[in-house]
Amino acid sequence: MHTKRVLVAGAGGFIGGHLVQRLKSEGFWVRGADIKEHEFAESAADEFLLGDLTDVNNTRAALAGIDEVYQLAADMGGAGYIFTGEHDAAVMHDSAMINLHMLEEGRKAGVKKFFYSSSACIYPEYNQMDPDNPKCSEESAYPAAPDSEYGWEKLFSERLYFAYHRNFGVQVRVARFHNIFGPQGTWCGGREKSPAALCRKIAETPDGGEIELWGDGLQTRSFLFMEECVEGIRRFMESDFSGPVNIGSEEMVTINQLAEIIMGIAGKRVRIKHVPGPLGVRGRNSDNHLIREKLGWEPKQPLRDGLSTTYAWIAQQITQSMATSSTRA
Ligand code: NAD
């Protein structure tokens, strides 16, 4: 049993939920905090504080007696949430406020180390126009030109964590996640990302049917399974390196290829209808030179493996939700 007491902010969310489980399995005492309870599982945390972390009183309560913080709470979603512009003010205000309170109240409360989850969305749009050759090495973040307000807030907050390190001596670990996916992630409702959305659409469509896909499907991305993300977080937290560092996969695919892989897993063929929709940058891939150099580790799991697990979980969620609605009817 660890004597360390850690806070996971955003513990009611996808990555936060998995991180709490991992920290518990390592023997930490864990407090989770979130504005909502976890949607898909009971939290494994020793304590769970349900509250809005833009309210400083909740932040103070969450931080009482805590040694180390994992700050994952953010107003976030996939392209359908971030790139429409409708949520820009809330995304910037709420996420920045959470980080401002977390650092200021945390340092006053004697927190020694903060992990912060930044994002690949901070990388400049001008380096991600070529789908075959996007540039996302850590130093390429400047001159800054993220393509969303979500990305700008993340960049501001990265700098805030490093400023608190310089001025107050707290330790920080800043990671830039690249498209994390897996079971217990949002799979419907508008905040879901492409792997979950495509798993859902393909699971719901009969063999030979048709699904809609935003854009021409030639935009590229890489996707990291949540287990390797959590492994990366823990290795990084225990390392001597502050970051920023990419935590992502280097297995880049087009969104059409992503759909093909999922069809293979599902054992069906569906036609793809390309429709206009919010897209984000043309190409993006993790660059793992720095994580290899600093941690002597990098994610290695093939995309297909994580997608198989995720597809099975989403198909099961669909069956369950259909059963629930037919019971209600
Ligand atoms: P998520 O939306 O599942 O988790 C974020 C959690 O923060 C949610 O449970 C949400 O309720 C909580 N939250 C939001 N506003 C809050 C508030 N005012 N007070 C308290 N809690 C609040 O997202 P996730 O995929 O688990 O992402 C975790 C972190 O990783 C986020 O900071 C996100 O920006 C970052 N990130 C994720 C990805 C990805 O692909 N999943 C990629 C890059 C960065």
Image: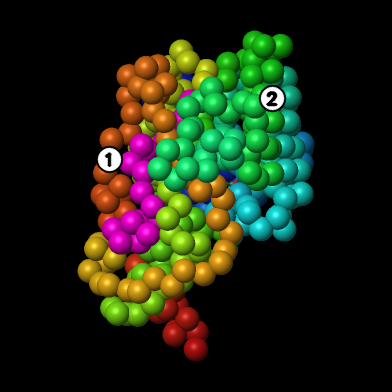
Residue at mark 2: 160
Q: Is residue 173 left or right of residue 206?
A: right
Kind of residue indicated by mark 1 = Gln
Image height of 7 relative to 42, above or below? above
| Residue 248, quarter of the rendered image | top left
Circle 1 SS class: loop
| Residue under the point 47% across and 43% down | 130
How crowded is the residue under tag 2: few (<14 C-alpha within 10 Å), some, or many (20+)? some
Quote the CA–CA distance across marks 1 and 2.
33 Å
Q: Is residue 246 magenta?
A: yes
Q: How many marks?
A: 2
| Residue 58, quarter of the rendered image | top right
Segment colored magenta: 244-262
Most extreme residue toward the bottom is 329
Give the camera-side residue of 148 and 55.
148
| Residue under the point 52% across and 40% down | 128
Find residue 132 and report its horizontal and vertical position in percent: 40, 43
Find residue 256 and report its horizontal and vertical position in percent: 37, 59
Quadrant where ligand 1 appears:
top right
Q: Is residue 214 left or right of residue 98?
A: left
Circle 2 SS class: helix
Q: Is residue 92 magenta?
A: no
Residue at mark 1: 301
